[in-house]
Amino acid sequence: RTQAHTRHILRHMSMPSTSRSSTIDKHAHISQHAWTAALAAVSPAGSAPHVWLDVGASWRSLTTWDLELNASLVVVGVDALRSNLDDYRQTNNPRFLKVDGACSSSAAPTVTFYKHASWTCGSLLPTRADGPKLGRGRQACTGDVPKEITVRQFSLRKLLGRMRALGAGRIELLKIDVQGSEFDCLSSGGDELMSVDNILLEVQDVSNTSSL
């Protein structure tokens, strides 16, 4: 009953799509080779994998221990910063597939990303000048002047579509933690959200009362 209710909500929030084309934007690309290698590492051999999507994986995906404990799990980890995905603390499990880029509803191929000193606090949203200062030095989240960089971007619909085209079937868990742009990312999923069973979503500063 809960699953049915969740799917009913997703159906109404999904943006209409005139086509479910298998042509996927290159910025949402997961190579066939990487997908095949991940499936080869699934145990028991030949069994259907449990597939998760971690949007906002940062420098150490929260799915790291799940991958260690569940040999049937395949995770696609997404982060706007390639340096986070390649960080020495990031999981090197062959069932963890790395996709660098920002999840957004924009149709533009790239977007400005505000990179703070802290690895976990980068955002598509600029920090307000009158906002509170959080952290300092290498731990600064908003207490510094962020570096503006250009990163590639893609919609959640294109990413989910690519996973479906590779044969992922249903996505057991979708986790989104992208520092204030969660709903924008989620709403870009369109009708592909119907392939997702569970969503773990950070809700940050909805009312903007913190001025972050």
Image: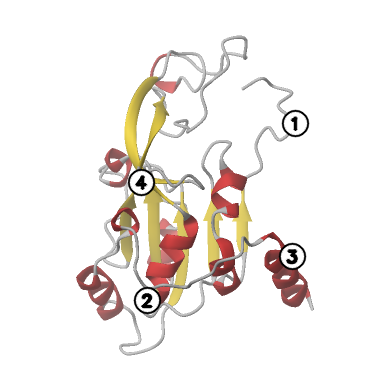
- Relative to residue 57, is residue 94 drawn left or right? left
Cα–Cα span, label 1 and label 2: 38 Å
- State the count of labels: 4
Quarter of the figure with residue 98: bottom left
> Which residue has dot 2 on it?
165
> Which residue has dot 3 on it?
9
> Which residue has dot 1 on it?
207
Callout 4 touching callout 2 (CB < 8 Å): no
In the foreground, 109 or 41: 109
Q: Secondary structure at mark 1?
A: loop
Residue 92 locus on image (x, y percent): 26, 57
Callout 3 touching callout 1 (CB < 8 Å): no
Q: Secondary structure at mark 3?
A: helix
Quadrant where the N terminus lies?
A: bottom right
Quarter of the figure with residue 147: top left
Quadrant where the C terminus lies?
A: top right
First of labels 2, 3 by sequence position: 3
* The disc label shown at residue 101, or none: 4
